Image: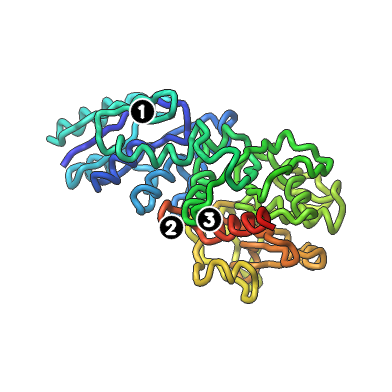
Amino acid sequence: MGLILVLHDTPHPALYGAVAAAIAAARQCGFMHVEARFDTKLHADAAQHVIASGGLGPSGLCWFERLSGKQAPPVATPETILEAARMQDVVVPIHPAFLVDEDLPAALSSAAQALGIEVKAITVREDSDCFFDTATREVLALRDRFGRIGLRSPRFYEGDGLAIGLIGAESDHRDVYPAALASLADAADSLSIPIDVRFIDPVHINQIEDPAVFDGLSGILLPGGADMKNVAGQTAAAALSLEIGLPTIGLCLGMQTMATAVAWRAFGRSTANLAEADPDAPIKTFVPMAGARDPDGNVLPIHRTGDQMIDIAPCTQLSGIVGSERQIRCNHRFRLNPALLPDLEAAGLRVAASSSSGAIVDAIEVPRHSFFIGMQGHPELSSRADMPYSLLVAFLESAAKRRSS
């Protein structure tokens, strides 16, 4: 029984706990993490990994779930770490750049030794290709899993693959929130389709609809995220793909901007927006759940996080794709404005999944479009290398069909 401290002085939130996760998965031992802090002005999505039991954690925790097949645990206290280390080997990632308590590693080590717990320290170094140079063969054996999704250097099949536009800044997805990129790789691998992921920063998308933005693309992915500066560009991208029939998938915020694009069709571009992004918008497409009730009189959550059950509408595109899957990882405080549903449905939108007796819309689709499906949850967090999420697979199949037509 012992404590393994993995010291990784990286400035990239996407790598939080990554090497520690690889070690824990390879050795089949415990994994715990301490309280972390991030500069959210610099990295808005650094702590957007949804813990299955509820709450948020560092975005790099997706690596533990991907490599181990287990759910990432909530933040642990020094006391609970020491208690666990007396029963089994426990791996703890230590990232100096993100520590809340800079003295914690030394204090934890001293306390463990005082209790007779063996302490080992592994120091991680990164080379220019973002491979890990450590003393452990486990990490060297697993490093290709990290390289496959290309955290900071392009490792997809540039130029000759299926061209997919990821509507987000490249640095956000390689260095901060890696799950969306990884889930695309999972789906592509399952189909044996090489993909060329092209990052399109939504901040730079001109709100004037210009089809040239999507030249050469076979589909676009609208990701989630906490940075509201991306909303205008994401919505413009969704509106354009809605008009030209480009296969489109939306994750959380991506679903919200897709629904808002339909609202632009119904009410006009300058009238509708998310309340979170524009509190003064004349028509608010997504409104706070706080204070609202479902049709049965139950109070909706202020912040809905963790694994949640949803009801998928029969005879929808989504029902044909996900089958019996009824659970999704959620993280949102806003819901589709129910007062707008009649107008949105008249403009072509269909509710594909819901919960709380219909008070919360969990998925939307536009049936007359080749593929225009968004989920309020985070299906990318349920994806694994050997078990991609079905909606992402269906999206790539639709994009491949468009390329070949």
* Mark with earlier residue (1, 2): 1
Q: Seen in the image, is 77 located left or right of residue 115?
A: right
Residue at 25%, 35% in the rendered image: 137
Which element type, helix, strand or loop, lies under badge 3? Answer: helix
Residue 104 coordinates in the image, percent (x, y): 32, 28
Q: Residue furthest bottom?
A: 314
Q: Report, in whole angstroms, how far the alpha carbon at label 3 lies from the one at label 2.
A: 12 Å
Which disc number belongs to residue 387? Answer: 2
Q: Amino acid at mark 1?
A: His
Q: Seen in the image, is 101 located left or right of residue 39?
A: left
Residue that label 1 marks: 8
Which element type, helix, strand or loop, lies under badge 2? Answer: loop
* Mark with earlier residue (3, 1): 1
Depicted 226 relative to depicted 395: above or below: above
Which disc number belongs to residue 379? Answer: 3
Q: Amino acid at mark 2?
A: Met
